[in-house]
Amino acid sequence: MSLENGSRRAPEASFGRVRRWAGRAAAAILLSGLAACAGDTFNYYPTKGDTKPHPGVAKAKQHPIQGIDISKWQGPIDWASVRAAGTQFAFIKATEGGDHVDDRFRANWDGAAQAGVPRGAYHFVFWCRSAEEQMAWFKRNVPNDPSALPPVLDVEWNGHSQSCPKKLPKAQALAMTKYMLVEMERYTGKRPIIYTDITFHKDVLEDELPDYPHWLRSTAAEPEQRFANRKWMLWQFTSTGRVPGVRGDVDRNAFYGSPAEWASFLSTDCDPREHPRLAGQGLCTGK
């Protein structure tokens, strides 16, 4: 992400799920206490770094909840070290278009779970395949795991692709995006997250789809300076990050809010700031 450089919900939560969320909430409260004592300049994860730090995104390090997104390009990952470094989440490339599965998806999916790193899967949209084909492929290859984070739909133009460099009209791209979001939610029971970059957001998403959490790529400035009228939940602030357990560069990301807000997101799959507005639509009601 660019990501390339990289379960249907049961009607009632099981006892095991309640226990898992209680454990996460307890960890969030502990981290919140540490944050309160730390002050605005506290570096939450000093073992993490950046080979090319940009001053425009320095504030990202002040957010207490941080994670990574990865694909086959990171190679084998020591997930126990990733967790020990304080990583709160990992989004893992699963599928692309209608015929590609990331070579390391299952190894990363299982490894993160075994290490206790909350993880979710992302699908990279290929605009020269139909939305129906792409969602059928996603469902075929991504486990329907109730314990996983919400899925991510990665929408960028395929400018890197020689076979599909074109941009679609806004109406067509938006219709495809909406269909895939609905199908992802139908399959997983979780509200999907939209990942996007500056160009695609300006061309297609600006002032659209306010009911979905957004994950924005902005590696040289704060998202508010690059994305018009968009509230962000996750911020990808560098593609040259360094994290123990990952060899070489890795995308680093920050959650907008506090540990308590992160716990709320984990329990509802929705941006906590949107709960009052979306509750009337039957969304964000908790597990």
Image: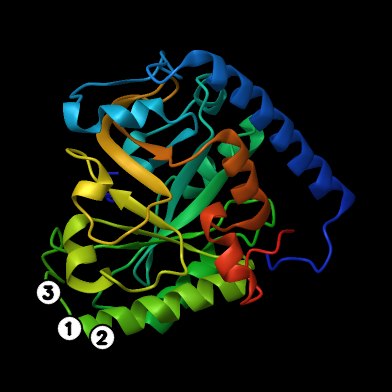
Q: Secondary structure beneath disc 3? A: loop
- The answer to the question of whether label 2 and label 3 lie on touching residues, with beta carbons closer than 8 A, is no
Q: Secondary structure beneath disc 2? A: helix
Q: Amino acid at mark 2?
A: Gln
Image coloring type: rainbow
- Would you name the residue on which mark 2 appears? 172
Total number of numbered discs in the rendering: 3
Pick whichever, 2 or 200, lies toward us.
200
Q: Amino acid at mark 1?
A: Pro
- The answer to the question of whether label 1 and label 2 lie on touching residues, with beta carbons closer than 8 A, is yes
- Would you name the residue on which mark 1 appears? 169
Question: How far across and down, in percent of the image, does residue 73 sit?
Answer: 31, 40
Q: Select label 2 or label 3 by which is in front.
A: 2
Q: Amino acid at mark 3?
A: Lys
Residue at x 55% of width, y 14% of height: 37
Residue 220 lies, with reference to residue 223, above or below; the image says above
Residue 157 shows in this picture:
no
Residue at x 59% of width, y 61% of height: 275
Question: How far across and down, in percent of the image, does residue 29 sit?
Answer: 68, 29
- Would you name the residue on which mark 3 appears? 166
